[in-house]
Image (cartoon, rainbow, N blue to C red):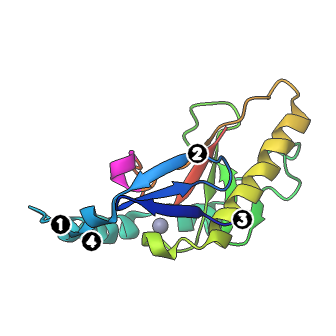
């Protein structure tokens, strides 16, 4: 599986390997003059949130477990991904799928294996929920990264329900 892309009139067209959806990117936009680069503010957010991050505690010490009907071992893991119950659920079967042990990753640090492991673990969870409750037929996988995508927790994770 690889990303298909081509350039036409200085616009880069990318075809998503999973969905065949197309997106357009103008690489020249990265060179335009900026009034503010936001790097200092972002660095502060990352450092501050790392100190307050609850995921290492929730994964290593709190040990909340999935119901035994969903997972006999209490947690679904795949590579660096760990799936565990959301402490503040807003839906039945609402869990967190933390993608990596690193608090923050730059975009070029998201190796395909990290994302693949998160998707594989999430699939296992979704299938287990459905096997346990045949009425649970419409799963949701939600991944937003960083405040600009409404991600209020910096540490990379997906929500599933
Ligand atoms: Zn963290």
> Quarter of the image holding residue 82?
bottom right
User: Are circles 3 and 1 on residues that touch, CB within 8 Å?
Assistant: no
Separation of disc 2 and disc 3 at Cα? 14 Å
Q: Judge whether 2 appears above or below 67 on screen.
A: below
Q: Which residue is mark 1?
A: 37
Q: Residue furthest front?
A: 9
Q: Nearer the viewer, residue 142 or 111?
A: 111
Q: Which mark is residue 118?
A: none
Asked if the beta carbon under badge 4 is closer than 8 A to the nearest atom of ligand 1, the reply is no
Q: Which residues are magenta?
A: 146-150
> What's the distance in space between the residues labelled 1 and 4, CA to CA?
11 Å
Label 2 close to label 4 by CB (< 8 Å): no
The residue positioned 17% from the left and 65% from the top of the image is 32
At label 1, counting other C-alpha atoms closer than 10 Å, the crowd grade (few under 14, some 14-19, many 20 or more) is: few
**Any part of residue 9 in sight:** yes
Q: Where does residue 69 sit, x and y in percent of width and height?
A: 89, 42
Question: Which circle, 1 or 4, is nearer the viewer?
Answer: 1
Of callouts 3 and 4, the N-terminal one? 3
> Which label number is shown at residue 1?
3
Q: Which mark is residue 21?
A: 2
Q: Earlier in the sequence, mark 1 or mark 2?
A: 2
Instruction: Report the magenta stretch's main SS.
Output: helix
Tags 2 and 3 touching, CB below 8 Å: no
Secondary structure under badge 3? loop
Residue 59 at what x, y percent from top left? 63, 64
User: Helix or strand or loop: what does disc 4 sit on?
Assistant: helix
Which quadrant is the N terminus positioned in? bottom right
Q: Label 3 crowding class (10 Å Cα cut-off): few <14, some 14-19, many 20+?
A: few
Give the alpha-carbon distance from disc 3 to disc 1, as whole Å. 34 Å
């Amino acid at each position: 599986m690889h990303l298909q892309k081509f350039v036409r009139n200085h616009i880069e067209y990318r075809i998503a390997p999973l969905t065949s959806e197309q997106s357009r990117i103008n690489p020249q936009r990265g060179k335009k003059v900026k009034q503010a680069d936001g790097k200092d503010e972002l660095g502060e957010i990352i450092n501050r949130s790392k100190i307050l991050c609850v995921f290492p505690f929730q994964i290593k010490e709190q040990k909340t477990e999935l119901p035994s009907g969903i997972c006999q071992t209490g947690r679904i893991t795949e590579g660096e991904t760990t799936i565990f119950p959301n402490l503040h659920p807003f839906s039945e079967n609402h869990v967190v799928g933390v993608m990596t042990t690193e608090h923050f990753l730059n975009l070029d640090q998201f190796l395909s294996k990290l994302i693949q492991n998160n998707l594989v673990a999430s699939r296992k969870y979704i299938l287990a929920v459905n096997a346990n409750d045949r009425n649970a037929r419409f799963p949701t996988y939600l991944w937003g990264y960083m405040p600009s995508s409404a991600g209020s927790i910096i540490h990379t994770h997906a929500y599933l329900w």
